[in-house]
Amino acid sequence: MGVIGLPYFAFFPWFDVFMSLILLVAITITIATHGLIMFLVYLSIMLSLQALMVWYACRLDEEKLYLVWYSIFANFYYSHLLNYITLKAGISYLLKREISWGKLVRTGVITIKELTPYKT
C-alpha cells in the first residue's frame, strides 16, 4: 500500500492546487473574452448539473435532501480553503519553519477505577 498510497498523498494535493490555478486563469480568460454574463450562464449550468447529481446520489443512499444545498455552497469555500492550507503548509515546509499545535492547558482530572477481571 505504501508504494501506491504515499506517492498519491504526496502528489495529489499539489496537483489540486495547480489545477485550481489553471481554473482561475480559465475563468479570467472566459470573462475577458465572452463577458461576465456568459460566465454566469456557464456557472449556473455546471452548478445545476452538480445539484442534480447530488440529488440523485442522496436519493439512492436515502440521505436528507438538504445536502444538495450544502454541496452547492461547498464549491465556493471548501476547495479554496484546502488549497490555502496546502500552500501555507508547503511554504512553511520549504522555509523549514517550526510548526506545532501549541501548548495545551490541562485542567481536567482523570480518575481511573480499579479494573476487575472479566468473569465467565
Image (spheres, grey):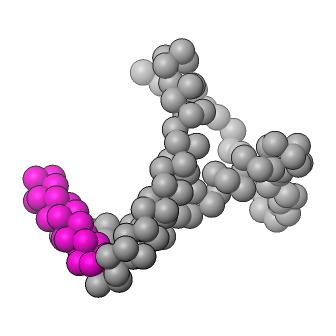
User: Which SS does the magenta portion mostly show?
Assistant: helix
Q: How many marks overall?
A: 0
Image point 42% across, 62% down: which residue? 26
Left or right of 109? Residue 36 is left
- The answer to whether residue 78 of the structure is visible from this angle is no
Q: How far across and down, in percent of the image, does residue 91 sit?
A: 77, 50
Choose between 109 and 8: the one closer to the eye: 8
Q: How far across and down, in percent of the image, does residue 27 sit?
A: 42, 68
Res 88 quadrant in image? bottom right
Image point 56% across, 25% down: which residue? 7
Choose between 15 and 26: the one closer to the eye: 26
Q: How far across and down, in percent of the image, does residue 25 sit?
A: 49, 62
Segment colored magenta:
38-64
Left or right of 87? Residue 117 is left
Q: Is residue 98 magenta?
A: no
Q: Is residue 115 above or below residue 78?
A: above
